[in-house]
Image (cartoon, grey):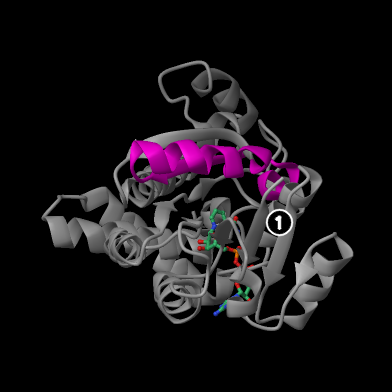
Amino acid sequence: MKTIAFIGLGNMGGGMAVNLVKAGHKVRAFDLSEEALARAKDNGCETFATVAEAVAGADAVVTMLPNGQIVKSVYTGDVIGKAPKGALFLDCSTIDVATAREVAGLAGEAGYTMVDAPVSGGIAAANGGTLTFMVGGSEEAFAQAEKVLEPMAKAVIHAGQAGSGQAAKMCNNMLLAIHMIGTCEAMALAEKAGLDPQKFYEISSKSTGYCWSLNDYTPVPGIGAASPADNGYEGGFASALMLKDLGLAIGSAHDTDAKVPLGEHALEIYKAFVEAGNGGKDFGAIFTTL
Ligand code: NAD
């Protein structure tokens, strides 16, 4: 049993913290939201009034926060220097590679071990303990991190040095955005060309068009695999979060002079969709614009 501080008990972090409790760990929780804190308390976490109090005495600190700016301010303001020396830090938020490397460097200089460990899988996977973690950090850091992440995970994969987990996450989600838009376009075209969409699904999901968006998350109501499309595009992976992830990928592409024309176009498509008031809809709802 370890003592683990958990900061950020939102849609994802709330369920993740509970899975650490179920695995027998002592979880010291903090969130700015009273409601999130109360839920964590009901689920067996010990709750605290500040980050600094939550990380005191912790063997490991897990963070699941909205963005890089917040991650940096929480670590530099309230975690580094407040958690016991030698504690392991695991940031599971999705943030930019540069900030992930910067914060890991600051933690290392202060005598801590840190990994970036963003996740693939949504709220259901967070609740069910079936997330995929992509971990950036040294071999030794990964070995320690794997043990902490295991109760929340379907898979824990070492991506490389600090920041590599975030690099894997943004590239994966840029690819996901592109094949989701492609799937929506193909489904809409099939229908307009007089083909039964169900037939197109049956054929393409067993042909070279197969991909996760088509085969496992079909974005058309009543067709193919069950997905948020069957529920009015409620739940699932919000378009606003996809837009955030595309912003991280395109920002990195600009910084590194990588050419990502389809990634840039995907960002424009999701930006327009979110600005039209659809940020809360599942990202497969792009189908409704076609
Ligand atoms: P969320 O907004 O539901 O939760 C974030 C939580 O952080 C909130 O409860 C908020 O009160 C808390 N918070 C904000 N600032 C804080 C601070 N300074 N100190 C303590 N708590 C603070 O977001 P989420 O959906 O849980 O996402 C969290 C992270 O996971 C994001 O980086 C997101 O991109 C990533 N992610 C989300 C999903 C998803 O499907 N929701 C999937 C994969 C990755």
Disc 1 crowd, CA 10 A, few/some/many (<14, 14-19, 20+): many
Total numbered labels placed on residues in the image? 1
Which residue lies at the image location 47% right of the left edge and 51% below the top edge? 118
The x and y percentages for residue 178 are: 38, 45
Report the front residue among 270 and 19: 19
Amino acid type of the residue that numbered disc 1 sits on in the rendered structure: Ala
Report the front residue among 227 and 160: 160
> Can residue 188 be seen?
no
Report the front residue among 80 and 221: 80
Secondary structure type for disc 1: helix
The part of the image, by quadrant, that contains residue 107 is: bottom left
The x and y percentages for residue 169 are: 40, 48
Q: Is residue 63 located in the magenta-colored stretch of the structure? A: no
**Residue at the extreme right of the image, as rendered:** 42
Q: Quadrant of the N terminus?
A: top right
The part of the image, by quadrant, that contains residue 252 is: bottom left
The x and y percentages for residue 86 are: 46, 57
The answer to whether 256 appears left or right of 99 in the picture is: left
The part of the image, by quadrant, that contains residue 58 is: bottom right
Does residue 155 sit above or below 33 in this rendering? above
> Can residue 141 be seen?
yes
**Residue at the extreme left of the image, as rendered:** 257
- Asked if the beta carbon under badge 1 is closer than 8 A to the nearest atom of ligand 1, the reply is no
Q: Is residue 151 located in the magenta-colored stretch of the structure? A: yes
The x and y percentages for residue 123 are: 68, 53
Which residue was labeled with disc 1? 17
Q: Which residues are magenta?
A: 124-152
Report the front residue among 159 and 273: 159
Dividing the image into four quarters, tell me where ligand 1 lies: bottom right
Which residue lies at the image location 52% right of the left edge and 48% below the top edge? 119
Does residue 66 sit above or below 288 in this rendering? below
Predominant SS along the magenta part: helix
